[in-house]
Image (spheres, helix red, strand yellow):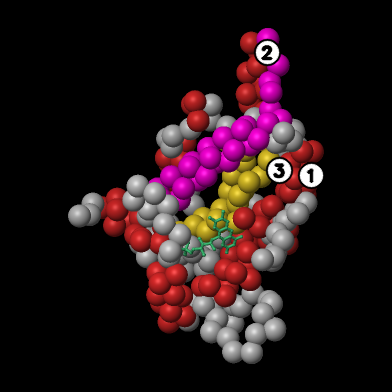
Amino acid sequence: MTTPTIELIHKHSSVRHYKPDPLPGETIETILAAGQRASTSSNLQMFSVVVTTDESKRARLMALCGNQRHIQQAPVFLAWCADLSRLQRVCDHQGYQIQAGYMENLLLASFDVALAMQNAGLAAESLGLGFCYIGAIRNNPREVIELFQLPRLVFPMCGMTLGWPARAPRLRPRLPLQAVLHWERYHPDDEEHLRTYDQAMIETGIYTGRQVSGGEHKSQLEYGWMEHSARRASKVHRPHLREALAEAGFEAR
Ligand SMILES: Cc1cc2nc3c(=O)[nH]c(=O)nc-3n(C[C@H](O)[C@H](O)[C@H](O)COP(=O)(O)O)c2cc1C
C-alpha cells in the first residue's frame, strides 16, 4: 500500500550539496507555514524559526557548527528554536506568572520544534528542495543566541540548511522495521536484525573515510552501523547544554 505522501517520505535523504540559487521568500514562507501546521502540545506553539540568507551570517554559522560546508553552501539557513518567551508575553498580558523552568516545558517545546521542522522538511522535499538538520547548532549555543539576538526563553534547538540539491543524495537504509516495531510488548531480542542491518550499511560504503575515532583496542574490525553507533553513543556530547539551557531560562527542574 502506498500514496504519493508515503512515497515522498521514503525518498528522504539529507542534502549536503546545494546549488547556489537563492530561494524566493514566498517559497520559504510556504514551507514554514506547512511546518506550523504540525500538531503542537495544547496548541501552545512553543517554537520560533529564524531564517537567514545572509552570506556572512552563514559563514559565521558554519564556523560555529563544526565547519560543515553545506551550511555556507546552502542559500538558506533556518534556526529552529524552542520558544517560551512568547508565552511569557502572553502571561504578562493576561496577568499570570509563567512557570517555564520545568522539564515538561523543555520536552513540550522540543516536541513542537521537532514536529514543525519535520513538516517543513517534507514540504520542502515535495517542492524538489533538499534540507539537512544541523544539530551542531548546539555546539556553541551562546554565540548563536547572540548572532540571532534571541531573548531569554528562546533557545536554538536545531539548524536546517535548505536549498536546491546539487546532486541526488544517497539513500541511507533504516533498521529493519522488526527492530523498532514491538507488538503488544517490548522485545529486546533484536540481534539478528541489527546484524542484518549492519551488513547492509557496510555494503553502502557510507562509512568509508567517515569513521568515528575509538576502537584502537580492537584487532579485527568490521566497521558498520553497530561499531559506528557504539562509538558515538559511548562518547559524551555537548556537556555544556544543561548550563546553556538554564541560562536561557530552561532550567528543566
Ligand atoms: C536532530 C538532528 C541533528 C542532525 N545534525 C546534523 C548535523 O549537524 N550535520 C549533518 O550533516 N547532518 C545532521 N543530521 C542529519 C543526520 O545525520 C541524518 O538524518 C542521518 O544520518 C540519516 O540520514 P538521512 O537523513 O539522509 O536519511 C541531523 C539529524 C537530526 C535528526
Q: Which residues are magenta?
A: 95-123
Near-viewer residue (7 or 110): 110
Q: What residue sits right under mark 2 in the picture?
A: 96
Q: Residue at x 52, y 68 (%)?
A: 17
Q: Residue at x 69, y 52 (%)?
A: 138
- Residue type pointed to by label 1: Glu
Magenta span includes 170: no
| Label whose residue precedes the other's in the sequence (3 or 1) | 3
- Quadrant of residue 11 in the image? bottom left
Percent coordinates x, y for residue 144 in the rendering: 73, 48
Q: What residue sits right under mark 1 in the picture?
A: 243
Discs 3, 2 touching: Cβ within 8 Å: no
Q: For marks 3 and 2, give the CA distance.
A: 28 Å
Helix, strand or loop status at disc 2: loop
| Label whose residue precedes the other's in the sequence (2 or 1) | 2
Is the stretch drawn in magenta largely helix, strand or loop? helix
- Residue type pointed to by label 2: Tyr
Q: For marks 3 and 1, give the CA distance.
A: 19 Å
